[in-house]
Amino acid sequence: MAATKELKLTMYRSMNGRLKAHKSCARGLGIRKMHNSVIVSDTPENRGMINKISYMLHVEEV
């Protein structure tokens, strides 16, 4: 069984004044506030949300 890849996401820009869809993506990924880091699995669904708000995130492979 292959090990699942994981990504560490850190939000470094505020959600104030962002589009509602972008705020929803951040909440869907589990990010609640600035400088908060979360670990998510590397799936196409998560990658799509990450790409949508990539200007607000730092992404690292874990």
Image: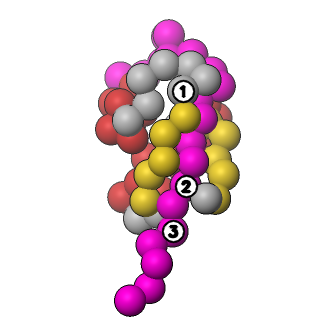
At x 39%, y 41%, the residue is 29
Q: What percent of the width, then of the height, locates residue 33?
A: 48, 19
Residue 17 visible in the current orientation = yes
What's the distance in space between the residues labelled 3 and 2, CA to CA? 7 Å
Query: Which is more toward the observer, 33 or 2?
Result: 2
Q: Kindly give the residue lying farthest to the bottom in the view shown.
A: 1
Query: Which is more toward the observer, 39 or 53?
Result: 39
Q: What percent of the width, then of the height, locates residue 9?
A: 56, 42
Q: Circle 1 is placed at which residue position?
A: 36
Residue 21 visible in the current orientation = no
Amino acid type of the residue tagged 1 in the rendering: Asn
Is residue 7 on the magenta stretch?
A: yes
Q: Quadrant of the C terminus?
A: bottom right
In the image, the segment drawn in magenta is 1-21
Element under disc 1: loop
Q: Are marks 3 and 2 in contact (CB under 8 Å)?
A: yes
What's the distance in space between the residues labelled 3 and 1, CA to CA? 20 Å
Q: Is 50 displayed left or right of 28 in the figure?
A: right
Element under disc 3: loop
Q: Is residue 16 above or below residue 13?
A: above
Say few, some or many: other residues with alpha carbon within 10 Å of mark 2 (under 14 / 14 to 19 / 20 or more). Answer: some
Say few, some or many: other residues with alpha carbon within 10 Å of mark 1 (under 14 / 14 to 19 / 20 or more). Answer: few
Q: Is residue 23 above or below residue 5?
A: above
The quadrant holding residue 34 is top right
Q: Mainly helix, strand or loop, the magenta region?
A: loop
At x 44%, y 52%, the residue is 40
Query: Which is more toward the observer, 3 or 45?
Result: 3
Q: Circle 2 is placed at which residue position?
A: 7
Amino acid type of the residue tagged 3 in the rendering: Lys
Q: Circle 3 is placed at which residue position?
A: 5
At x 47%, y 57%, the residue is 47
